[in-house]
Amino acid sequence: MIICERKPIDEIKGFIAGKKKVLLVGCRGCVTVCNAGGTKEVEILAALLRLDAQKEGVELTVDEFTLERQCDPEYVDELADLVAKGYEVILSMACSVGPQFLSRRYPKERVFPSLNTCFIGGALAHGVWAEHCQACGNCIIHNYGGMCPVSRCSKSIMNGPCGGSSNGVCEISKEVECVWHLIASKYMDEGRLEEFAPIQPIKDWSKSRDGGPRKIVREELVK
Amino acid sequence: MSEFEPKIIAFCCQYCAYNAADTAGSMRLQYTPNVEIVLIPCSGRFDVILALKAFQSGADGVYVAGCLEGGCHFLDGNIRAKKRVVYLQNELKKIGLEPERLAMVNVSASQGPQFAAYVDEFAGVVKGLGPSPVKKQLAA
């Protein structure tokens, strides 16, 4: 899933400074699962903003709504009646796709992101997420024991480990495990090191970001 | 002008702190009447939104009372509650509300005197801070 983190409250307060009517829109997709922008987080941020306004003696209405997803036009359409009520600012609590879709669908509205979109990853434990994919467009993890050297190696090297690997930890931080250590250990544990030994060919990066923004068209699905 | 009497909301776990309040009552212990106790099934039920709503509604202080660490009926509800309290204290600080208005305390069911003493102690802290700035605006 896409892992996001809420922006600092001061930055969000800056978006709504001087405004009296704000719509806070959550998303039931990835950001609900990573506890950044679901119904609950919308409720908490709205409460904090209201509390701040109350404290300052400033008039502020914060309405809350959570869409099924903000990255699908049919769900974004559901916001039309609410948007028609007239808000000075719409705060999106989705990954950065959400505010872009809201802006496109409601071009007259001022839409701001309330989250920082961090990475594609998974939960290592409740409350702990780690990057596991960089959307390079050409998955090669099967060549690396099911682990991704593109996203999980600090240097994204295809033939490792490098000299910075020490006791299974990357030189950049003791918090970062060396994926190349994990890959090599796995092959060794399975007694298949010879399968791993060949030098991997240069990766085809043509499906990554090199060609600019990417798009997929599935003709069998297009109306 | 009459002395400021803070309004305090205490979210009390039914297995310990709520019973500690009962124990305090049975022992005829006197403590400040500023606290309103809300029964929760475990301090792990405490959610930041509960405290935020209490503050929004004019509470001057909020505290969560759970079992002694290691003594939670659901193993780690009190540890989770503590983390949520720390998280919200930081958020309150960022919006300019004193984090001391929110607290976590651990008491067992038999610790009536400790419960009563804590209520007085927390009420003293909140009195020292003065009325919640949110409340001031609500009253205006």
Image (tube, coloured by chain):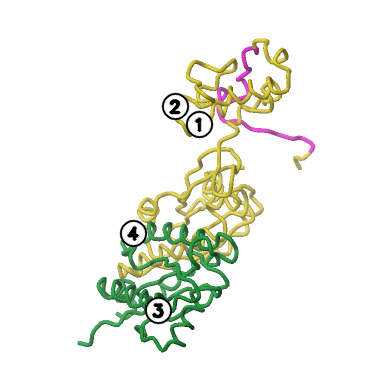
Chain colours: A yellow, B green
Residue topped by disc 2? A172
Looking at the rendered image, the disc whose residue lies closer to the viewer, 4 or 1, is: 1
Q: Position of residue A176 (x, y in %)?
A: 50, 31
The magenta segment: A200-220
Three-letter amino acid code at the position of disc 3: Pro
The chain under label 3 reads: B
Q: Is residue A200 left or right of residue B43?
A: right
Is A67 situated above or below A200? below
Residue topped by disc 1? A176
Q: Which element carries disc 2, helix, strand or loop?
A: loop
Q: Residues within 10 Å of mark 2 (few under 14, many from 20)?
A: few
Residue topped by disc 3? B113
Q: Residues within 10 Å of mark 3 (few under 14, many from 20)?
A: many
Cα separation, mark 4 vs mark 2, equals 32 Å
Image point 62% across, 54% down: which residue? A28
Q: Position of residue A206 (x, y in %)?
A: 61, 20
Is B113 situated above or below A66? below
Cα separation, mark 1 vs mark 3, equals 48 Å
Instruction: Name the foreground residue: B10 vs B94.
Output: B10
Looking at the rendered image, the disc whose residue lies closer to the viewer, 1 or 3, is: 3
Q: Position of residue A64 (x, y in %)?
A: 52, 64
Q: In which quadrant of the rendered view does residue A183 lie?
A: top right
Image point 49% across, 25% down: which residue? A170
Is B120 situated above or below A209? below
The chain under label 2 reads: A
Residue topped by disc 4? B93
Q: Is residue B4 magenta?
A: no
Nearest to N terminus: mark 4 or mark 3: 4
Looking at the rendered image, the disc whose residue lies closer to the viewer, 4 or 3, is: 3
| Circles 3 and 2: CB atoms closer than 8 Å | no
Q: Which element carries disc 1, helix, strand or loop?
A: loop
